Amino acid sequence: MLPPTALDGLSHAELKALVERLLGEVSKLKETVTEQRDEIARLKGLTARPKLKPSGMEQASAAKAPPGGRGKRRGRGAKKLSRVVVEDRVVKASVPPGSRFKGYETFVVQDLVVRASATRFRRERWVTPDGLTVVAPLPSGIDGHFGPELRRFVLAQYHQGQVTVARLVELLQAIGIEISKRQVVRLLIEDQDRFVAEARAVLRAGLETAAWVTVDDTGARHKTQNGYCTQIGNDRFAWFATTGSKSRLNFLELLRAGHGDYVVNAAALAYMRSRSLAGPIIRQLAEHGDQRFADRAAWQAHLEQLGITALEVLPDPVQIATEGALWGSIKAHGLLPDTVIVSDDAGQFNVGRHALCWVHAERLVHKLETFTDDKRAAQQRIRSLIWWFYDDLKAYRRDPTLQRKAALRARFDRIFRRRTGFATLDRLLARLLANKNELLMVLDHPEIPLHTNGSENDIRCQVIKRKISGGTRSDNGRDARDTFLSLLKTCDKLGIRFWEYLGDRLAITGAKAVPHLPLIVAQPARPV
C-alpha cells in the first residue's frame, strides 16, 4: 500500500487503476464479512437472511410463444367510445371568401368533470285531519347528508385507489366538499351491513359450488394487536377475513361462512377419528341425543356435561371435538361438497380434500444453503427434475389420460426416492415423498391449479392496504375493509367494474344494473 504522500506523484491513469484495485478489495472484504456474519448466526442458532431470487418454475414451464415472432401489429382503427355519451360541438373555421364547405373532420376528446354540488331538498310537511304530521320522503339513494355519488367516490378511492383517509379528506376539501376526517371514516365503515351480507353470501356460493379453492394468509393489525388476514378464493371469487389467530380451529370457523352452529354428524365423527380422538369420547358424542348446537356456548356446555373438558390428555379432546363439530357444520350446510383445498402446506389449512402447492414445494429445494460444488450440483440436478416433472403435470392437466397418470406417479417416486449424498436435501426429498398424495392430487382432479399464486396475488391488496393505512381500530372498520376488498376482487374476477357495482348498490341514478354477485359466482364458469 502506498503512503499518502506518494499519491501526489501518480498519473491519472495510475490513480484510476489504484482506485479500481481498492474497490475490488473492498467488495471481497464485504463478501467475507457477510459470510462470517452468516456463519456466526448459524453457530448461534440464528436464522441468516438468505439472498434468494424467486424460483421461476411457473414462468419457466409456461407454454412457449409460437415461432415466427409477434407478426405485424394491427392498426387500432377509429376511436369508439361505448361507455361515454359523446357531445357534438361544431368548431367554426376562419376561411377566405369563395371557399367551399367539405364537411367535418372529427376529433374526439375525453374529459372528466369533478365539482362539488349541494342540493337543498324542500320536503313538504302536511298535517292530516287526525293530527298526524306527514313529511315527503327523500329520493331513492339519499341516505344521510352526503349523496350516493360522493359515497361511491370515497369507497372507490379508498379501497380500489388505495388512498389514505388523510389524503382523501384533503382531496375532497380541495374539490369543495365541506367534510371532516370523522365524516369520511363514517362513510367508509358505518351502515355497511348489506355489503357485509353480500360478501358473506359470495363466500357461501363459492364454497357450495367450487371444484377447488386456494387459501393463504398474511399478517394484519387490529386494535393495536397483531393478527392475521385469511384469503379464500378461486378464479370466480375472493373473500378475506381478519382474525386474531391462524389456527386450524379458526380456519374451520371461517369455512362455516357465517353459520354459528356446531353439528355432530358422520362427517364430524370421521374428522375426529382422522385426528386420533379417543374412541370412548367419539362414542359419547355419537350416542348422545343432541347432535346440533346453536352456538359456542351451547357446545361448550355439552362438552362439560359429558366430562370431556375435564380430561387432560393429548391430543386435546376439546380442541379435536370442536374442530370435528365445525367440520360437521360445514358439511351440514352443503359447503365444500367435493372441493379441493390447495394450500402452501401451512398446517391450519390441512382439512378435507387437501392438495399442496408445487411452487412452495420446489421453493424448499431452492432455499437450501449449499456450501460446496457437489452439494450445489445435487441441488440443481433435483431442481431441474422437479421443473421437468412440473411441466409434464401442466401438460397432463390439459390432456389427462390413464397412461400419463400412471407414468407420472411412477416418475414421482423415482425423483423423490433419490439419495444424493447431501443429507439436508435427502431429508427434504423424503419429506416431499411423504406428501405424495397431496402433491399428486391433480392426477385425480385435473381441474385444480398446481400452485397458490392466485391467492398470493389476491392477498397482495391486503398487504398494500396494511402498509399504506396501517391497522384497523374498530370491528366495523375491520369488517368494512375485509368486505370491500372481497367485493373488489370478486368483481375483478367476474369482469365487473367495481365503480359500476358501487353505483348500482348505492342506487345512483342511471347506474348500470349489476346482478347479485353470489348468483354469478354460483353459475358454472363459461368454457374458454
Image: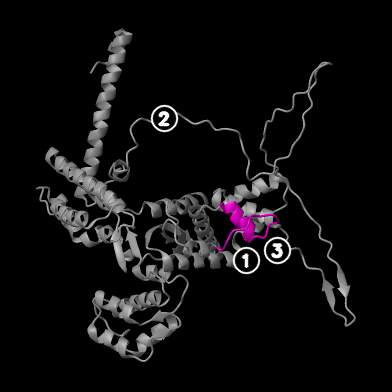
Q: Is residue 473 visible?
A: no
- Magenta-tinted stretch: 497-516
Q: What secondary structure is found at the residue carrying circle 2? A: loop
79 or 133, nearer to the observer: 79
Is label 3 in contact with label 1 (beta carbons under 8 Å)? yes
Give how far apart the Cα atoms at labels 2 and 3 are: 55 Å
Tell me the residue at 35%/30% (across/down).
Answer: 68
Three-letter amino acid code at the position of disc 3: Asp
Compared across the picture, whether 294 is left or right of 283 comes to: right
User: Where residue 201 appears, x then y in whole percent?
Assistant: 51, 67
Three-letter amino acid code at the position of disc 1: Asp
Compared across the picture, whether 103 is left or right of 442 comes to: right
Residue position marked by numbered label 2 in the rendering: 71
User: Where residue 114 appears, x then y in whole percent?
Assistant: 70, 44
Residue position marked by numbered label 1 in the rendering: 191
Residue 106 figure quarter = top right
Q: How is the image coloured?
A: one colour
526 or 267, nearer to the observer: 526
Verify whether residue 282 appears in magenta. no
Give how far apart the Cα atoms at labels 2 and 1 are: 54 Å
Residue position marked by numbered label 3 in the rendering: 143
Tell me the residue at 40%/74% (across/down).
Answer: 330
Three-letter amino acid code at the position of disc 2: Gly
Mark identifier at residue 286: none
